[in-house]
Image: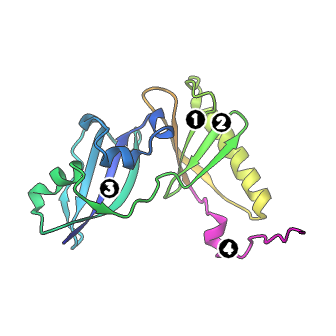
Amino acid sequence: MRNIEVNYRIRLGIGFIFNEPLAALLEGKLDKKDVDIQIIGEDGNVISDFSNAILDVANSFEGHVSVSFKGNVKDKNLQHYFFKGNVLSEYKSMILNTFKIANYALYEADDNIFYFTRCDLKEFSEAFFLEAENVWKIFVDYYSLIYGVSLNASIESVSLSEDGRVCKLKTRGFCVVEKQFNGEMKLNRILSS
């Protein structure tokens, strides 16, 4: 058996709302020009690095998956077997939480990355970065108020998809309350019978 780590990039677009990007990737539903992967071996060495010059951090969804292959697949064949779906993996959704803020939907991913769209799925205005700042401020304020914590979270960068309908926010300082307090702040309610 062969175990590897795969970092992937998928062209940023509105499709993630209707189809989970990793599932679409493993099912072969995505065009090769819209995908890029990096393969890391068991020893931590990069076997195959990102090579699609069209995709970068700003214009793509980023994810990670641990993959196992039955048998001892050679390094040169790993990419082929991965794209053909001959893998075993523990599937983890890219989107951890979804929040509705006014006329926007905010999607939380790993590593302080958020994506947001308009609820009507229309394009953002030319001043999309101002919309992003406003949505982020409202989200942080309400999150702090609801969980009773003080967050010093800020936006590092804002980028817009080619179709103009998805904003990607790279942030710093956001900490999920459940991770921070180990679930101690959960409320148990006993309903009367």
94 in magenta: no
At 22% from the left and 72% from the top, the residue drawn is: 42
Magenta segment, prevailing SS (helix, strand or loop) = loop
Q: Are marks 1 and 2 in contact (CB under 8 Å)?
A: yes
The CA distance from mark 4 to mark 2 is: 28 Å
Disc 3 element: strand
Circle 3 crowding by C-alpha within 10 Å: few under 14, some 14–19, many from 20: some
At 67% from the left and 59% from the top, the residue drawn is: 152
Identify the amino acid type marked 2. Tyr
Counting residues from the start of the chain, the first of labels 3 and 4 encountered is: 3
Q: Which residue is mark 1?
A: 117
The CA distance from mark 3 to mark 4 is: 29 Å
Which residues make up the magenta segment? Answer: 172-193
Q: Which mark is residue 7?
A: 3
- Quadrant position of the C terminus in the picture: bottom right
- Quadrant position of the N terminus in the picture: bottom left
Q: Is residue 159 above or below residue 182?
A: above
Counting residues from the start of the chain, the first of labels 3 and 2 encountered is: 3
Disc 2 element: strand
Q: Which residue is mark 2?
A: 104
Q: Is residue 185 above or below residue 174?
A: below
